[in-house]
Image (cartoon, rainbow, N blue to C red):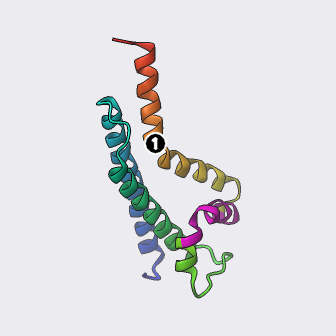
Amino acid sequence: MSSNPATRTNIKTLLVASLICVSAMSALVDGLFFWRGIYAAPVTAAFADALLALLLIMWIAADQRDHPQVERPFDYGFLLMVFWLPYLPYYLWRTRRFAGLGIFAGFLGLFSLGFLVQLAMWSAFVMYPR
């Protein structure tokens, strides 16, 4: 990865935009499956979840270079792949303090967007039955 800060910012922005796009497309597919009465779409859900996790791991790795207070051991990439879920809140708190909690809530919202779309559709069906 380049050492130019502008390039790192562009890569981080591209990764976040990719996270948002993949999450929105996955939520759209989940909503369409729910609307048609198909309650499980395991292949699409597993693919979207794996892609979201990979994009988030890549964002953490790109973002870490801007924060020298976080040490980067030799096997940082492997450890990030294995322990990304418990490491994410710690990393965001360590690098951004209270703003990191908001970013963490945003990531949680992106990962649960499919469920939230289905919940909104279900509540609309309950409130306004045919």
In the figure, residue 46 lies in which quadrant?
bottom left
Dominant SS in magenta: helix
Q: Residues within 10 Å of mark 1 (few under 14, many from 20)?
A: many
112, above or below 49, in the image: above
- Is residue 25 a member of the stretch shown in magenta? no
33, above or below 43, in the image: above
Total labels: the figure holds 1
Q: Quadrant of the N terminus?
A: bottom left
Q: Position of residue 26 (x, y in %)?
A: 36, 47
The answer to whether residue 53 shows anywhere in this view is: yes
- Say whether residue 100 is left or right of residue 77: right
Q: Position of residue 42 (x, y in %)?
A: 37, 50
In the figure, residue 117 lies in which quadrant?
top left
7, above or below 39, in the image: below
- Say whether residue 54 is left or right of residue 98: left
Q: Secondary structure at mark 1?
A: helix
The answer to whether residue 17 shows anywhere in this view is: no
Residue that badge 1 annotates: 113
Q: Position of residue 61 (x, y in %)?
A: 52, 73
Q: Residue at x 32, y 42 (%)?
A: 29
Q: Quadrant of the C terminus?
A: top left
Magenta span of residues: 82-95
Q: Position of residue 56 (x, y in %)?
A: 48, 63
- Identify the amino acid type marked 1: Leu
- Say whether residue 26 is left or right of residue 94: left
Q: Residue at x 33, y 53 (%)?
A: 43
Q: Residue at x 49, y 44 (%)?
A: 112
- Say whether residue 32 is left or right of residue 87: left
Q: Residue at x 59, y 48 (%)?
A: 105
